[in-house]
């Protein structure tokens, strides 16, 4: 038996054999909404592009392979992916979510889904006891990010999966793997039931597309998700699927360099006299550094930090970098800087999940490390 292909090989080939019609080496963009039927119900596996599209199928198969899962589904955004997963939860059921998640995820849970009768509470997912005591007899889903957005906390996925299996209501463990990507960690292998992504970020990798994904192993969950994907219809177009497929081909290379650059930037910040606190799982003083070393291939490209002074000082920093561009989002080749409390996490303001106003978040890109350090040195003073 030949060895199963490694991650780098899957990233380039999984789900993408040469096109059967033409031999095209790159997956064609099947820009079509519908497919001819030679007689009623007689077709080549595709009827209508909300239900299925060959370019999307290539992406879905590739995503499943990268996560080491059986079934992949692509969506029009990360939020559409998460929303579709949450439709697995019925009114009257309960979700334990991390207390440090993307602001849009909290907004969806608190401002939309709660109104349809799903119960939510929020726990520090780094603290297993806190998660355990948040579980209820009607808990259907535990929803976590690791590392979290924006505080870069980790949770022990294997321990949470064991906890979910042992609990009477047998909730699913769902993991938003956007920050880590499957190159750095594969939650399904650690016992998670559902993995979700904003493919807008590292998977796409070039800040040119918005998309989402879900990967699962269980056939019944997959069937329900496929039903929901078609019924709700938050699907990506073929061009967007192609952009994500193209981005994924270099994911391993990019993640290696994101991790290297971020480690150098985090060390620079940690040594800087004007910096009060740095949150990066690769720093030895990060509270889950040992877990990060065990659970992740490298420590990723995201860093949060607080400068000495007040929010105005933080605003001055984010408005004065030249290479780090002031923008929401993350995971592209270019470095970004932002103020979560006022930007990506404005929707958690006033809630228990509120982010401190002076927190700065970096998405460390692939520019030369010395240029990144020079840029931050100029901005921080
Ligand atoms: O933007 P969209 O593709 O819909 O993905 C939403 C989403 C889901 N999960 C995580 C962990 C995310 O970070 C995001 C989007 N986040 C940003 C836009 C941001 O700047 O944090």
Image (spheres, rainbow, N blue to C red):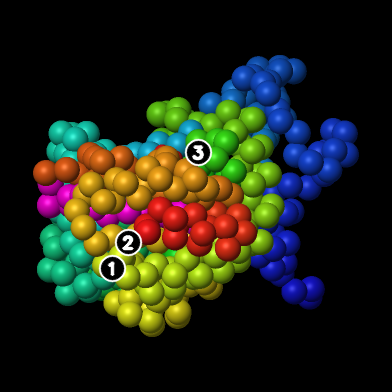
Q: Label 1 neighbourhood size at 10 Å, few (<14), some (14-19), many (20+)? A: some
Residue 308 image position (x, y, % from top left): 24, 62
Query: Which residue is the site of mark 3?
Result: 211
Q: Does 355 lie within the magenta span?
A: yes
**Residue 292, position as x, y percentages in the image:** 41, 75
Q: Which residues are magenta?
A: 351-364
- Give the mark nearest the N terminus, 2 or 3: 3
Task: State which quadrant residue 142 falls in.
Answer: bottom left
Question: Percent position (x, y) of residue 229?
Answer: 45, 35
In the image shown, does 207 or 110 lie closer to the viewer? 207
Q: Secondary structure at mark 1?
A: strand
Label drawn at residue 277: 1
Q: Residues within 10 Å of mark 2 (few under 14, many from 20)?
A: many
- Find the distance from the CA under tag 3 to the CA under tag 1: 33 Å
Give the answer, above or below, for where 207 lies relative to 377.
Answer: above
- Disc 2, disc 3: CB below 8 Å? no
Q: Residue tagged by mark 2?
A: 305
Q: Is residue 61 left or right of residue 105?
A: right
- Seen from the viewer's position, the closer of residues 37 and 58 is 58
Position of 379 with respect to 5 (left or right) is left
């Amino acid at each position: 038996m030949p060895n199963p292909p490694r991650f780098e090989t899957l990233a380039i080939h999984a789900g993408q054999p040469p096109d059967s019609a033409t031999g095209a080496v790159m997956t064609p963009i099947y820009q079509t909404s519908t497919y001819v039927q030679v007689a009623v119900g007689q077709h080549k596996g595709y009827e209508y592009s909300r239900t299925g599209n060959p370019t999307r199928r290539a992406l879905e198969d590739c995503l499943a392979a990268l996560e080491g899962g059986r079934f992949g589904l692509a969506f029009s955004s990360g939020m559409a992916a998460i929303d579709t997963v949450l439709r697995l939860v019925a009114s009257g059921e309960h979700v334990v979510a991390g207390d440090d998640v993307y602001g849009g995820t909290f907004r969806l849970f608190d401002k939309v889904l709660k109104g349809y009768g799903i119960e939510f509470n929020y726990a520090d997912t780094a603290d297993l006891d806190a998660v355990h005591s948040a579980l209820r007899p009607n808990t259907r889903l535990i929803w976590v990010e690791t590392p979290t957005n924006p505080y870069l906390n980790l949770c022990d996925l294997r321990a949470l999966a064991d906890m979910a299996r042992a609990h009477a209501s047998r909730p699913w463990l769902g993991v938003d793997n956007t920050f880590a990507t499957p190159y750095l960690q594969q939650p399904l292998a650690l016992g998670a039931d559902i993995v979700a992504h904003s493919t807008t970020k590292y998977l796409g990798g070039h800040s040119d597309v918005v998309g989402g994904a879900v990967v699962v192993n269980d056939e019944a969950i997959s069937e329900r998700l496929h039903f929901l994907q078609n019924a709700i219809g938050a699907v990506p177009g073929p061009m967007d699927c192609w952009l994500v497929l193209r981005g994924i081909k270099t994911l391993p290379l990019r993640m290696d360099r994101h991790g290297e650059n971020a480690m150098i930037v985090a060390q620079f910040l940690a040594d800087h006299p004007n910096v009060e606190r740095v949150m990066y799982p690769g720093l030895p003083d990060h509270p889950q550094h040992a877990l990060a070393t065990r659970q992740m291939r490298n420590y990723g490209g995201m860093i949060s930090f607080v400068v000495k002074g007040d929010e105005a000082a933080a605003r001055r920093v984010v408005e004065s970098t030249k290479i780090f561009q002031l923008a929401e989002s993350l995971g592209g080749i270019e470095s970004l800087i932002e103020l979560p409390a006022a930007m990506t996490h404005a929707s958690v303001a006033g809630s228990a999940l509120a982010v401190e106003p002076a927190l700065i978040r970096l998405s460390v890109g692939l520019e030369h490390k010395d240029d990144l350090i020079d840029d931050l040195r100029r901005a921080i003073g």
